Image (tube, grey):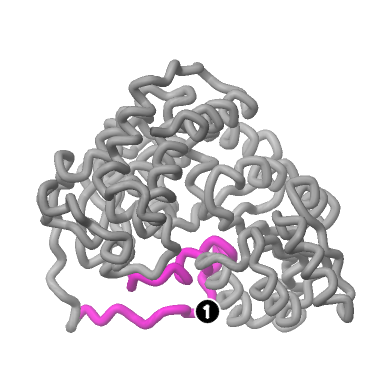
């Protein structure tokens, strides 16, 4: 079929007003009409969602906050769009307005049910939510296979690994080399981090991201979540995932194979590249970023992570190896700790301390159901210290 006459593929952007969601909208705008945005969903950003409705003209939208949804309904009464609210509204949005692709960038555990609902439609899932895979990978990955869905990671590191594995046999993987920028505090000692403020933690040297994930990058908790994510996505053991600090963020990750050969994926640090790849796979379409100039490329450096200064990474490996509900405990304790740190209620070093305390007192449930995962999360939130 001639490309000019190709019917646009229907797309749902869940988490559309967040950082990744807005960049997804930008990718869609530059895609040459390859996608028709059918549905949108957000938390409570009424103004942001209204702007996207007027720009993209979706058929239906959902706001998790019911009061915000009522406000939005009044604002867009001149447009033919259905406004839904809450988790039940999200379920309706996914099941009644089915799309070919779901770009899911909802942050946190609240995404768990929507991700599973989207998988059950048999669509392509372009996923940038870590928490759902980390806590329920043992449920999600079989669901992907059972429903004939596609799961393409949008995280730059996991997109890089996915690209390195193209044309390769999974059983020939020796090691996944997961790169980390090291965040704003690379090279610091634990003593130097005692009085770190939220403003300092939010100054990431390479990436423009939301507040929570930026703090996670500073503590390396984000890299710990990515280790667990890689375990589920690519079916490798924790011993096969090695974190490598790479300050320049040019190599997004690498795979070493059984013969010793290593494949790496390189690019400028811009989230639009993995978003575009996930939406259009297996095609490579519009160039979203500047080209790498290898004649002007800075020296590339690699370091070992420091487990003493950044204990969250060590705790993530421990949680992943224990399995069951322990990854949920790691994630929930980290979420509450980061939220309190950003509010000035917890010191920076207290983030990892809270994770360790929560893990120490938790009694693990093996092979947990969705309800048991959510119960473990609620327990952590209720008993945070």
- Name the residue at 72% across, 41% down: 120
195 or 40, which lies in front?
195
Asked whether, in this view, residue 106 is left or right of residue 350, the answer is: right
- On the image, the x and y values in percent for residue 81 come to 85, 70
Find residue 359 and report its image quarter.
top left
Quadrant including the N terminus: bottom right
Find out whether residue 287 is within the magenta segment.
yes
- On the image, the x and y values in percent for residue 221 come to 33, 45
Asked whether, in this view, residue 330 is left or right of residue 305, the answer is: right
State whether residue 330 is above or below residue 14.
Answer: above
Residue located beneath label 1 in the image:
286
* Residue 351 visible in the shown view: yes
82 or 269, which lies in front?
82
- Specify the principal SS of the magenta part: loop
Find residue 197 and report its image quarter.
bottom left
Residue stretch rendered in magenta on the structure: 267-294
- On the image, the x and y values in percent for residue 155 come to 44, 56
Sort mark 1 into few (<14), some (14-19) or many (20+) by Cα contacts within 10 Å.
Answer: some
- Name the residue at 56% across, 57% down: 105
Asked whether, in this view, residue 296 is left or right of residue 368, the answer is: left
């Amino acid at each position: 079929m001639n490309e000019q006459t190709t019917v646009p593929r229907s797309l749902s952007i869940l988490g559309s007003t967040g950082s990744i969601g807005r960049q997804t909208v930008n990718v869609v705008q530059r895609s040459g009409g390859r996608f028709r945005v059918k549905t949108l969903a957000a938390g409570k950003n009424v103004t942001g969602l209204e702007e996207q409705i007027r720009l993209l003209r979706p058929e239906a939208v959902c706001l998790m906050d019911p009061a915000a949804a009522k406000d939005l309904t009044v604002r867009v009464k001149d447009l033919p769009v259905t406004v839904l609210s809450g988790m039940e509204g999200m379920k309706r949005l996914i099941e009644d307005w089915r799309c070919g692709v779901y770009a899911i960038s909802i942050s946190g555990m609240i995404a768990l049910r929507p991700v599973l609902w989207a998988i059950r439609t048999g669509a392509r899932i372009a996923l940038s939510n870590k928490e759902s895979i980390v806590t329920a990978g043992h449920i999600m990955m079989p669901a992907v296979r059972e429903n004939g869905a596609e799961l393409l990671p949008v995280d730059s590191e996991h997109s890089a690994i996915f690209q390195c594995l193209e044309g390769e046999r999974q059983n020939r993987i020796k090691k996944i080399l997961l790169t980390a920028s090291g965040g704003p505090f690379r090279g610091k000692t634990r003593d130097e981090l005692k009085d770190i403020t939220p403003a300092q933690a939010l100054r990431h040297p390479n990436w423009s991201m939301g507040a929570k994930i930026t703090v996670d990058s500073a503590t390396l908790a984000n890299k710990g979540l990515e280790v667990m994510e890689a375990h589920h996505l690519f079916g490798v053991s924790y011993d096969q995932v090695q974190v490598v600090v790479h300050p320049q963020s040019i190599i997004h990750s690498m795979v070493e194979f059984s013969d010793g050969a290593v494949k790496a994926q390189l690019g400028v640090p811009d989230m639009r590249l993995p978003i575009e790849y996930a939406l259009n796979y297996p095609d490579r379409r519009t160039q979203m970023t500047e080209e790498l100039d290898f004649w002007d490329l800075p020296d590339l450096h690699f370091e070992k992570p420091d487990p003493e200064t950044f204990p969250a990474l060590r705790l993530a490996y421990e949680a992943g190896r224990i399995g069951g509900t322990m990854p949920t405990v790691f994630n929930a304790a980290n979420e509450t700790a980061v939220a309190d740190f950003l509010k000035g209620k917890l010191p920076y070093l207290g983030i990892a301390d809270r994770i360790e305390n929560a893990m120490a007192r938790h009694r693990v449930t093996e092979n947990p159901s969705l309800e048991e995962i959510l119960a473990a999360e609620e327990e952590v939130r209720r008993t945070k210290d």
